[in-house]
Amino acid sequence: MVAVGVRLHLALYVRIGSYDIRSQHYIPPSANLATIVKSLLGKGWNTINSLSLVFVLYILLYAYITSGGGLTASHLSALTGTDIAPRLGSLIISMLFAVFVWLSTRVVDRVASVLMIGMIVSFFISAFGMMSSVSLDTLFDTHAPTGTAYTPYIWVALSTVLVSFGYHIGVPSMVKYFGGDTAKVAKSVLIGTLMALGFYLLWQVVVQGNLPRTDFAPVIAKDGDVATLLGAIGKSGFIGTMLGAFAYMALTSSFLGVALGLFDFLSDFFGFGDDKTGRAYAVAVVFLPPLVLSLIAPFGFTTAIGFAGLALTVWGVIVPALLAKAHRQKHPDSTYRVFGGQFMIYFVIVFGIINIIAQIGGYLGMVPSFGG
């Protein structure tokens, strides 16, 4: 059932990405998301879209700072033999990455490239190293009491999976990169999504095949804290080191990408210059709010990702469908067609509304959540 749900999400997200591509078919390749939305949907939707976008990026930074701080503190504690507080770890990682972003985009690109290479290498080493200890009984939860069902928990997972497979903010950049060739963009979206799905499924197998469902309780109690998850898996030695390295580089590479995206957006919005002073102002606006919130209220990764999923539903699901609808009305002679017609557009919008209702229901305790 989980596999079916993931495949449904995959199909929907590729469809949504196609709507983003379609909406740019008559718009210059250099146009950004705000320009596209304003052109097709007007100022009102552009304001809603921009606010939801900024909220998602800020809440993701908060999640990365909180979880990254915990991992940083854990690694520093192991290296120094002293107890480093997670909040101090959050401060350290925020200051370090703020310096990278302040220096230049090229510095961020080089650091991110190193992190990506290290992440891929450590992922495969740790994943295949853990594969030998995967238990089919644990993976398929054969020891669960009769009548145990996990299907009701799918609803609260919608927002998390949406964030995990969300790429729509990058579609305008891809259209620009490929010179407006929408066929190449669509192919890149499909291949990239399938690659992400492959990594995701492999990770699910090695984690859920090593960690019994009941052992997820302390991880859930810590709101999905990554350091707690690594401790629960209990791998030591070289594989444990690689697992920790993968988790850290995966989180920090995403951290850098989101920080740079928000930096560029706010620099343009506030008109900050590209000199050292202007970049310093932009860095302060980007990093200080999520850092302060993380120090005051470190609720954890899962809660933050859930909130991000709510806002992402607006600009990552509903808005692309509305863009496609408006595009068809303005350009009925377009040669680029997305399969499904009007039905699929409304189906995607309904999916977005269900996603919002399910997430709010989870927060209110009206939708069941797995507790281990």
Image (cartoon, grey):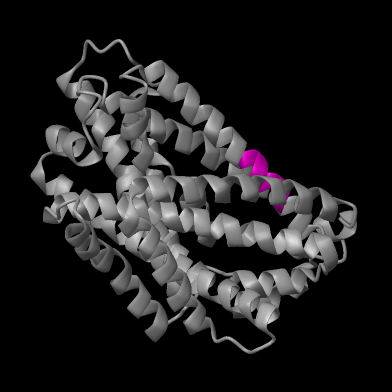
* x and y, in percent, of residue 315 in the image: 30, 47
At x 22%, y 10%, the residue is 333
In magenta segment, residue 130: no
Name the foreground residue: 78 vs 39: 78
Relative horizontal placement of residue 216, taking residue 355 as reference (left or right): right
Name the foreground residue: 371 vs 87: 87
* Placement of 363 over or under 263, stated as above or below: below
Relative horizontal placement of residue 34, taking residue 164 as reference (left or right): left
Would you say the magenta stretch is mainly helix, strand or loop? Answer: helix
Instruction: Residue 322: name its quadrant.
Output: top left
Instruction: Residue 195: name its quadrant.
Output: top right
Quadrant location, the C terminus: bottom right
* x and y, in percent, of residue 78 in the image: 69, 79
At x 21%, y 25%, the residue is 327
Relative horizontal placement of residue 179, taking residue 133 as reference (left or right): left
Name the foreground residue: 29 vs 119: 119
* x and y, in percent, of residue 65 in the image: 45, 70
Relative horizontal placement of residue 244, taking residue 286 as reference (left or right): right
At x 33%, y 33%, the residue is 173
Residue 366 in sight: no
**Magenta segment range?**
197-203
- Tally the numbered discs: 0
* x and y, in percent, of residue 303 in the image: 47, 70
At x 16%, y 46%, the residue is 45
Residue found farthest to the bottom: 83
